[in-house]
Amino acid sequence: SAPLMIGITHSHSYHGLQDHNHESVLEQVLGGVEVACRRHNAVPYPWQQSRLLGSPEADAFFERVSGVIMSGGEIDDEVVSAIAARGKPIVLIGGHRPGSAIPSVAADSFAGMYLATRHLLEAGHRRISLINGPDTTYTSREKKAGYLSALADAGVPVDLDLLVARDDRSGFTDGAAEEMSRAVLTRSDRPTALIYGADTMARAGYRVCRELGLSIPEDVAI
């Protein structure tokens, strides 16, 4: 019999190559899917352009797959609905849909950010900036909540000028991270520590520190 085929796509409406710089997560998820498929005599079927899932162009995809894994912190209802309308089971990776029956697997972004912020507080920092991903993503909202909770539990007042994000999908790009880093690091009362919502954003922050002549961790911790 033909091997089981597992579909994998974005959980948001992906438009192709112009979005590619923002899509490192799907590639990592695909690697895990391939490992699991090899163990169970199954085959992954990646479908990049999730915006087409509601169109007849996706007929061949849905005829072949037995279920679909959707990846990404941002979840677009129309993409989920397009798959659900075909009667295919769905699993979300990297995000969560509160109140939904769709199973999801994701890191504990709240706890991770809480621990990162508490670590810096215990090291003596009081002006800690969070340079976060866009609020449209579930994971970014969870990270913001973890950051704010750690400050509150330590009795440190929140300076909302140090909580920086760009609320569209470009907010994860290197260019956005550099601009946000430069904005907080050139303040007269600049933070003594920075936390980033993604490692690629942190690397952009390192470049800004070099550009401004700031040493890590002597001048600013990251």
Image (cartoon, rainbow, N blue to C red):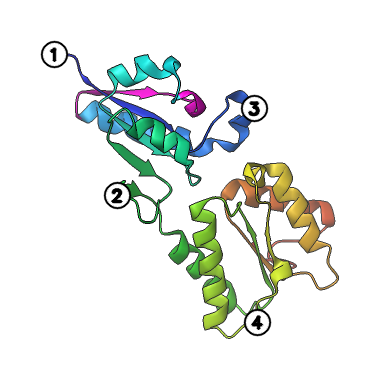
Please check the rendered image and state whether residue 51 is part of the magenta-colored stretch, yes or no: yes
Q: Residue at x 43, y 39 (%)?
A: 71
Find out whether the residues at labels 1 and 3 contact each other: C-beta distance under 8 Å. no
- The residue mark sitting in front, 4 or 2, is 2
Mark toward the start of the polypeptide (4 vs 3): 3
Answer whether residue 169 is visible to the viewer in this image. yes
Secondary structure type for disc 3: helix
Name the residue furthest right.
188
Mark toward the start of the polypeptide (2 vs 3): 3
Q: Residues within 10 Å of mark 2 (few under 14, many from 20)?
A: few
Query: From mark 2 to mark 3, how far is it between C-alphas?
Result: 32 Å
Q: Residue at x 52, y 75 (%)?
A: 149
Quarter-of-image position of residue 212: bottom right
Name the residue tied to disc 3.
18
Secondary structure type for disc 4: loop
Query: From mark 4 to mark 2, how far is it between C-alphas?
Result: 38 Å
Name the amino acid, label 2: Ala
Q: Which is nearer the eye, 115 or 210? A: 115
Span of residues in magenta: 40-52
Name the residue tied to disc 1.
1
Name the residue tied to disc 2.
101
Query: From mark 1 to mark 3, how far is it between C-alphas?
Result: 39 Å
Mark toward the start of the polypeptide (1 vs 2): 1
